[in-house]
Image: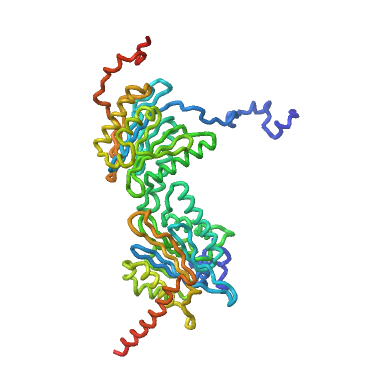
């Protein structure tokens, strides 16, 4: 006879064998994200007169290891907006599923109503802020590109803290240091951006991607690029960086594999 | 009033396939004073006849503004309308907060339709005893919706509910083709004329017993809207006077036609 109260009412071990507690939740504390694991690097984007150009490479790194080389980090939403994801890839996949279900929900009911890029950005920033307030952030930096309620080009950023920011050109991660100044040369303000042609914008973004590949050790020469205009989204997911020139490299001490 | 044994709750069908509690709820709508709604290409208006319980009391509140872009008018139990309108206010606000978007009308009306329907299918609940006309604008232009206690909702070009509303509906049916191209002022006048049709013999439209709600679009998109505005008391004088004059003329015309 077992006199311990916690055994009362339970099957007796000596008759039925030890209770298989693997069916119960194995305790331990609830775990929250402490740091990103598999990560994507920069996303860059630039407004031009008819829309927005956005680009990100196809690499997902595991620490400094180039682990997955075919990860699409630009995601379409409702054929009207594109979200570019930097930061944790699993959180990106979660957000992607969230956005897909939101898209279905929106398209299901009333016809003629869609969420534009501005609505999408507001929504995403609320999701991110909610998660950071739960001390369980979605470890991403996002760029949302598309058109706003008045069909004008829209570009804004949101990050893991729920901070939002908007500018004619934006870049996340390493790109914020290396690409942003280059894009600002082309479009210092909204007015300048509204005069840019598609060709100029494409060139500036591709040039930024190239510089990032030269100098960002977590980047890759295969990338995705999307152009969002009134006519829809032109998304190419398997572009190769062209006209690379590594002539500058051997002049720089400590660059690449050389150590001394 | 004691029709049979099948009217004690809203979950039991009568052998004829009717749910009497729901039909009684529709009767409650017919006890309320009449409200009229009309929509054109650019505007949606609500016009309501207010009653005062006694000489010394104030008049009812028949039109409620929900959000910048929509409002409703009610016929039936005012307290049920308050529950529904508070819910609609919450839904509108949450759409603005999470998406930065004015909620599409059809979605909002569907959501109260669903709420009302569940009340007709659960034991111990009762249907709402109120009918609503919901008028507003969204990305797809101006809209007018009718809501019934059964949970039925439908979009209307023009509609009248409440006591003696059949007369108003007859007026609306006669003038149906004119509404589409009406401006704001014309639409209000049509609404008041419809309201006047349904008045009892010894009653007249006065600034005390009329309420008018107007909402419309100024141009393309949601940025240029004329927000929902409620007119009461001296503010409806302009239109009430027009209708009072209008009927005299109309009466003269009619008598002239008869003569010739």
What residue occupies the far bottom of the structure in this picture?
Answer: B259
- Quadrant of the snapshot with the N terminus of chain A: top right
Task: Give the percent coordinates (x, y) of residue B96.
Answer: 45, 50
Q: Which residue shows up at 43% across the image and 58% down it?
A: B69
In the displayed structure, does residue B6 sit left or right of residue B154?
right
Q: As rendered, which of A117 and B174 lies closer to the eye?
A: A117
**Whole-percent x and y of residue B93?**
48, 52
Residue drawn at (44%, 33%), measured in percent from left and top?
A: A140
Asked if B73 appears above or below A200 in the picture, the reply is: below
Q: Position of residue B107 (x, y in %)?
A: 43, 54
Pick whichever, A33 or B230, lies toward us. B230
What color scheme is it? rainbow
Q: Residue furthest top?
A: A260
Q: Residue at x 40, y 70 (%)?
A: B188
Image-quadrant location for residue A50: top left
Q: Is residue B175 above or below residue B81?
A: below
Image spot of residue A233 (x, y percent)? 29, 41
Front residue of A155 and B64: A155
């Amino acid at each position: 006879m077992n006199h311990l109260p916690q055994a009362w009412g339970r099957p007796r071990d000596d008759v039925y064998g030890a209770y298989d507690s693997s069916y119960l939740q194995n305790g331990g504390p609830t775990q929250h994200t402490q740091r990103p694991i598999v990560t994507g690097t920069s996303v860059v984007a630039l407004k031009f007169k008819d829309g927005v150009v956005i680009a990100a490479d196809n690499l997902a790194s595991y620490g400094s290891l180039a682990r997955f080389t075919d990860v699409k980090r630009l995601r379409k939403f409702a054929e009207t907006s594109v979200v570019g994801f930097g930061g944790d890839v699993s959180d990106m996949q979660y957000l992607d599923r969230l956005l897909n279900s939101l898209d279905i929900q929106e398209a299901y009911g009333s016809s003629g109503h869609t969420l534009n890029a501005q609505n999408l950005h507001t929504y995403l920033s609320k999701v991110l802020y909610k998660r950071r307030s739960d001390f369980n952030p979605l470890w991403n930096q996002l760029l949302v590109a598309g058109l706003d309620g008045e069909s004008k080009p829209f570009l804004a950023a949101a990050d893991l803290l729920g901070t939002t920011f908007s500018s004619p050109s934006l870049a996340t991660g390493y790109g914020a240091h290396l690409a942003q100044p280059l894009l600002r040369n082309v479009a210092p303000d909204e007015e300048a951006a509204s005069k840019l042609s598609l060709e100029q914008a494409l060139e500036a973004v591709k040039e930024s991607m190239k510089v990032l590949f030269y100098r960002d050790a977590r980047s890759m020469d295969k990338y995705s690029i999307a152009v969002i205009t009134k006519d829809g989204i032109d998304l190419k997911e398997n572009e190769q960086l062209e006209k690379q020139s590594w002539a500058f490299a051997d002049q720089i001490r400590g660059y690449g594999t050389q150590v001394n | 009033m004691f029709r049979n044994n099948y009217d004690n709750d809203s979950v039991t069908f009568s052998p004829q396939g009717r749910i009497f509690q729901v039909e009684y709820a529709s009767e409650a709508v017919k006890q309320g004073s009449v409200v009229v709604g009309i929509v054109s290409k650019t505007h949606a208006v609500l016009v309501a006849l207010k009653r005062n319980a006694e000489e010394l009391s104030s008049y009812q509140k028949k039109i409620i503004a929900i959000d910048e872009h929509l409002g409703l008018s009610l016929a039936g139990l005012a307290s049920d309308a308050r529950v529904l309108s508070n819910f609609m206010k919450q839904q509108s606000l949450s759409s603005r907060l999470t998406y930065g978007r004015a909620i599409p009308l059809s979605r909002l009306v569907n959501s109260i339709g669903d709420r009302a329907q569940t009340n007709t299918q659960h034991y111990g609940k009762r249907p709402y005893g109120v009918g609503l006309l919901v008028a507003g604008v969204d990305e797809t232009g101006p809209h007018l919706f009718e809501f019934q206690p059964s949970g039925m909702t439908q979009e209307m070009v023009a509609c009248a509910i409440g006591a003696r509303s059949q007369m108003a509906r007859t007026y609306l049916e006669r003038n149906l083709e004119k509404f589409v191209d009406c401006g704001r002022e014309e639409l209000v006048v049509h609404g008041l004329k419809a309201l006047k049709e349904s008045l009892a013999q010894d009653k007249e439209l006065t600034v005390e017993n009329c309420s008018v709600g107007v909402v419309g679009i100024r141009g393309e998109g949601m940025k240029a809207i004329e927000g929902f505005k409620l007119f009461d008391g001296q503010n409806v004088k302009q239109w009430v006077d027009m209708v009072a004059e209008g009927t005299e003329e109309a009466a003269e015309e009619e008598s002239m036609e008869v003569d010739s």
